Amino acid sequence: MPYAIIKTGGKQFRVEPGKTYRIPSLVGDAGSDVVFKEVLLGSDGDNVRTGVPLLKGAKVTGEIVKHGRGEKIIVFKHKRRKNYARKRGHRQGFTEIRINDISLG
């Protein structure tokens, strides 16, 4: 089973063709193609190639499925005996992508 480790949005993801992943928000409309050129490691099923730090000529292509926002998290700050309490909510944006092809160059 081919797979690759890509870097996007300051994070690293292990991706395989045909699967969908939620990554930090990307620019683009749903249905448009996206290419990831920062490939750190790649495997074609038999051989594993690692980059130093990136694989030369390797790329991962995918398609944007949708954009959305994740679950709400509550940020609560409190200082005892000081009459200080702050409650905030946050929802992080994401882009859902489907990986089409992995090319190791």
Image (spheres, rainbow, N blue to C red):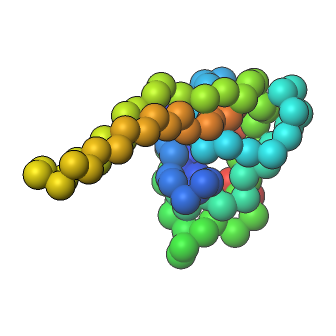
Identify the residue shown where x is 61% and y is 29%: 69
Which of the 4 image quadrants contains residue 9? bottom right
Which quadrant of the figure contains the C terminus?
bottom right
Q: Residue furthest left?
A: 81
- Residue 85 placement, left or right of 88: left
Which of the 4 image quadrants contains residue 57? bottom right
**Image coordinates for residue 92, horizontal then vertical, percent:** 55, 38
**Image coordinates for residue 24, horizontal then vertical, percent:** 61, 44
Above or below, 11 against 25 in this view is: below
Is residue 65 or residue 48 the one in the foreground? Answer: 65
Which of the 4 image quadrants contains residue 40? bottom right
- Residue 23 placement, left or right of 84: right
Query: Is residue 17 at all visible to an observer of this figure?
Result: no
Is residue 97 or residue 89 the one in the foreground? Answer: 89
Is residue 66 or residue 54 the one in the foreground? Answer: 66
**Image coordinates for residue 13, horizontal then vertical, percent:** 51, 46
Identify the residue shown where x is 67% and y is 34%: 95
- Residue 36 placement, left or right of 73: right
Above or below, 72 against 61 in this view is: above
- Residue 26 placement, left or right of 32: left
**Image coordinates for residue 61, horizontal then vertical, percent:** 77, 42
Identify the residue shown where x is 46% and y is 28%: 72
Is residue 15 or residue 50 the one in the foreground? Answer: 15
